[in-house]
Image (tube, grey):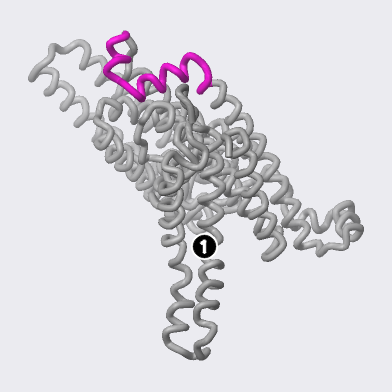
Amino acid sequence: MTERNRIPFLFVAMAVLLIIVGFLQSWSLSLAILNLCLISAIMALGVNIQWGYAGLVNFGVMGFSAVGGLMAVLISYPPVLEAWQAGGNGIMLSILLTLIAIAACVIAYRMLPAGRNRQIGLAIILAISFFVIRSVYDPAVNAIESTNAASTGFLGGFGMPIIISWAIGGLAAAGIAWVMGKITLGLRSDYLAIATLGISEIVVAVLKNEDWLNRGVKNVVGLPRPVPFEVNLQQAEWFINLSSWLGVDIVEFSSIYVKLCYSLLFVAVLLVILYLSEKALRSPWGRMMRAIRDNEVSSNAMGKNITSRHLQVFILGSAVIGIAGAMLTTLDGQFTPTSYQPLRFTFLIWVMVIVGGSGNNFGAILGGFVIWFFWVEAEPLGIWFMDVITSGMAADNPLKLHLIDSAAHMRLIVMGVVLLVVLRFSPRGLIPEKTSHGH
């Protein structure tokens, strides 16, 4: 099968699997899987920009996703006026003092001669700043978190349309990536992977503990949506008439309608990012990035600033991940910091890129669809498989009961099998990167 035929064939096969789920299980579930596949594909595109274009190992996907999710809260949730009155001024003042402290450190670093005097000067500035900032910050935080803590206890957001948070989430993730890149991009690839994973854990730990910002582990629920609520549709006359004309249950139809609306939005974002990614990959910039990836020594000898280019691509890929993180929080309708785990938000995304084909944007998208589909369907498939192999056993057989109860753990086994099979028969992924010397 040629590469030109392979891409449409694999995507059609993926569509067939989703259609089969619709017929055998439910169309609402099929669309729910589709929406999460679309978001996963965008995250995989972000990792592919970093790894496939430039060879950067970013194990901090979880942190950038969480930053995007946080932006969905800060942009869309209405401000909590009581909390602002209780401690908002203190938080603003502490942020201002932090910026002044950073500026003072920068000025001292530039003005003091290198050596012991610089170190002592910076230490004094940091020590004084710490105690001054905490004297303002701590009372403000306590006042905010004690304001109606059962339902709010945080400052809230700006009360703007949540769809704006998708772009803001990308910008915020890009800003975090700039800071992270300045710290880590001089490291060797294995140290870079460990550093990005560690920093992403710090980001998530902050979100779990700073209740004044996003309620911490108490979660923010009831976020606004860019699509109608099902209950509103079920009360709308035009929707009631439409469901009657189609002869479908109005509750099920409202769920399908909402998920279709999300699908259209997510597809639009995915197509825009895919178009820009393809333009970048085929441009002189993209060819330069791949040349740096393949041989840093030669690229450096030709005058390319390797660290600067790596920082560029690190920021771009992280921005895409941040967009996907904001989209995921929008779809969930809530922000749950405890849900950000490396398995789901880092390593699973990497499996998507590897299975799909690193360096190929269409491969990253396909990997997002394939891996998330089997991640969701592994449990029902595992239950069916266990039912089949234990069909000859008695209903109360201890082994049968144990195997059926263990079917949920088939998910990790299925992921391992999919990865091994793909790497065995297609080592460069389902849709490999195009090369100038053939396929």
Front residue of this view, candidates 380 and 346 = 380
| Image height of 132 relative to 207, above or below | above
Categorize mark 1 by other alpha carbons within 10 Å: few (<14), some (14-19), many (20+): many
Secondary structure under the numbered disc 1 in the rendered image: helix
Question: Which residue is rendered at x = 67% and y = 39% of the image?
Answer: 265
Q: Position of residue 281 (x, y in %)?
A: 51, 23
* Residue at 26% in and 25% down: 186
Is residue 399 among the parts visible in the rendering? Answer: yes
Residue 218 versus residue 321 in the image, above or below: below
Question: What residue sits 73% from the left and 48% below the top?
Answer: 228
Q: Quadrant of the N terminus?
A: top right
Q: Nearer the viewer, residue 122 or 197?
A: 197
Q: Position of residue 246 (x, y in %)?
A: 88, 58
Q: How many marks?
A: 1
Q: Residue furthest left?
A: 116
* For residue 112, side relative to residue 95 (left or right): left
Asked if one can make out residue 211 in the rendered structure from this viewpoint, the answer is no
Q: Which residues are magenta?
A: 280-302
Report the predominant secondary structure element of the magenta stretch.
Answer: helix
Residue at image mark 1: 378
Of 87 and 310, nearer the camera is 310
Magenta stretch holds residue 57: no
Instruction: Locate residue 258, reporting x and y percent.
Output: 72, 51
Give the residue displayed 89% in from the left and 51% down from the top. 238
Q: In the displayed image of the protein, which residue is found farthest to the top?
A: 303
Q: Is residue 237 above or below residue 390?
A: above
Label 1 amino acid?
Answer: Ala
Q: Please provide percent x and percent y for residue 339.
A: 45, 54
Q: Is residue 349 left or right of residue 229?
A: left
214 sits left or right of 25 in the view: left
